[in-house]
Amino acid sequence: MIGYGDRARTQCEVVRLFRETHPDLPPLNQGTIKMGHVRKVPSKRQAVVDDDTKLNLLLALEENPITPARQLARDSNLNHKTVLKILKYEKKRPYKMQAVQELLVDDPDRR
């Protein structure tokens, strides 16, 4: 319904049109309508996972903290993003191992 915000109709016309279109709903008053745009609010959908799956996921991470999140997702038959959301909610992070070369005494200083 094109309303008052884009100035195609006045507030009175919008109230009258709403009452005619939706007689079963409570009536609008002019104070309800104000200038502006209506936008969709993004929803934060929670992953629907049972407690046993969450527990198994967290136990697998505790058992081997080096396991990547993608491997945890494959093992538990979940989506990768779902696993990341669960880990973020539980404030857990899989560790990422990095190969680091050990410096010896004979190595030159390259700073």
Image (cartoon, rainbow, N blue to C red):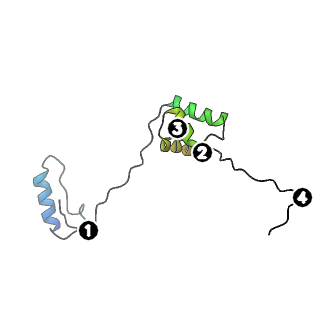
The residue beneath circle 3 is: 73
Label 2 vs 3, first from the N-terminus: 3
The residue beneath circle 1 is: 35
Label 1 vs 2, first from the N-terminus: 1
Contact, CB < 8 Å: mark 1 with mark 2?
A: no
Q: Secondary structure at mark 4?
A: loop
Residue 6 at what x, y percent from top left?
Answer: 21, 69
Mark 4 burial class by Cα count in 10 Å: few <14, some 14-19, many 20+: few
Q: Nearer the viewer, mark 4 or mark 3?
A: 4
The C terminus lies in which quarter of the figure?
A: bottom right
Q: Secondary structure at mark 1?
A: loop
Mark 2 burial class by Cα count in 10 Å: few <14, some 14-19, many 20+: few
The residue type indicated by label 2 comes to Lys
Q: Nearer the viewer, mark 4 or mark 1?
A: 4
Label 4 vs 2, first from the N-terminus: 2
The answer to whether 109 appears left or right of 65 in the picture is right
Q: Secondary structure at mark 3?
A: helix
Q: What's the CA distance linking mark 4 and mark 3?
A: 43 Å
Q: Residue at x 13, y 54 (%)?
A: 19
The residue beneath circle 2 is: 91
Q: What's the CA distance linking mark 4 and mark 2?
A: 40 Å
